Amino acid sequence: MLKRALAIITLLIIGYWLAQGLTGVPFGQDRMLVGQYYLNNVIKQTGSVNAVTAIVVNYRGFDTLGEVTVLFIASTGVGALLWRRKKKRTARTEGSVVLTTGARLLVPFILLFGVYIFIHGHLTPGGGFPGGATIATAFLLLYMAFTQYEIPHGAFEKTEGVAGMSYVLVGLIGLALGGYFLYDWIWQQWHWGINDVGRLFSGGFIPIIYTLIAIKVGTELSGIIDNMLKEEVRE
């Protein structure tokens, strides 16, 4: 009975706080002040045609850093769960002629498409996360087609680390120059003017950030794929 009474009292308190908060919102007035501010100032302040990209990478870029960190923790967790003393590639049959030939032909185009997605993230829908995931699918295709294929672990781990540190470095430079993390010092100092908005070399540091995110996401997802395709060698 005591637990039920405490639960009811807690719900009543939370409900009262929510009711007080809702009564403070003027009924019938425009509540999209923040969203309208973004739409009115996104091009002038970031140089990005894609407002969603500007919000994700620029206005709330610190939160995006948290998302990348979550992916890193998830990748580390998968590696820890699947790690054993020694591993080897799971026994699989070689891919068919159609699969191996298709992999040889399609992998370069998949990689190119992934690069296109994250480089043009400030111009069209896309960005670092979908671009990196697309790149990881190219390595998944190689694993499916060729039984002896294995990613270069040392190079991937170093590249992932450099990409993550570079993201933080870009943000810290903004903190030093503009007073807050991920201040777009490239757009503010060296942009080519409002007439250049919509071109590939626009958007301030957004293409740089998306490139770093894509590299980190692509290498981490490829590492997860590699770990899941290995099995323990029992001694």
Image: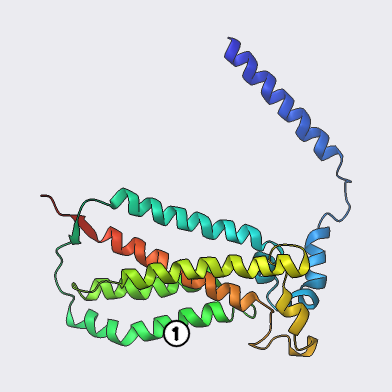
71 or 116: nearer the viewer: 71
Side of 158 where 42 appears, left or right: right
Q: Is residue 18 visible?
A: yes
* Residue at the image position 66 percent from the left and 65 percent from the top: 172
**Relative to 18, does residue 125 appear above or below in the rendering?**
below
Q: Quadrant of residue 53?
A: bottom right
Q: Identify the amino acid type marked 1.
A: Leu
Q: Which residue is mark 1?
A: 112
In the figure, 109 relative to 175: above or below?
A: below
Quadrant the N terminus occupies: top right
Q: Quadrant of residue 138?
A: bottom left
Which element type, helix, strand or loop, lies under badge 1?
helix
- Tell me where residue 193 appears, x and y as whole percent: 79, 87
Residue drawn at 77 percent across, 78 percent down: 188
Number of other residues with Cα within 10 Å of mark 1, as a class: few under 14, some 14 to 19, many 20 or more: some
The correct choice, above or below, for 90 with respect to 207 in the image is above
Give how far across and how far down residue 35 sits, in percent.
78, 62
Q: In the displayed image of the protein, which residue is found farthest to the top?
A: 1
Nearest the eye: 192 or 52: 192
Tell me the residue at 59%/65% (across/down).
Answer: 168
Looking at the picture, the colour scheme in use is: rainbow
Residue 126 in sight here: no
Place of residue 46 in the rendered image (x, y in percent of width and height, measured from the top left): 74, 75
Question: Which residue is pictured at 79% across the width and 33% down the height?
Answer: 19
Query: Is 28 displayed left or right of 204 in the figure?
Result: right
- Residue 124 horizontal/vertical position (percent): 61, 79
In this view, the residue farthest toward the left is 235
Q: Is residue 38 left or right of residue 225?
A: right
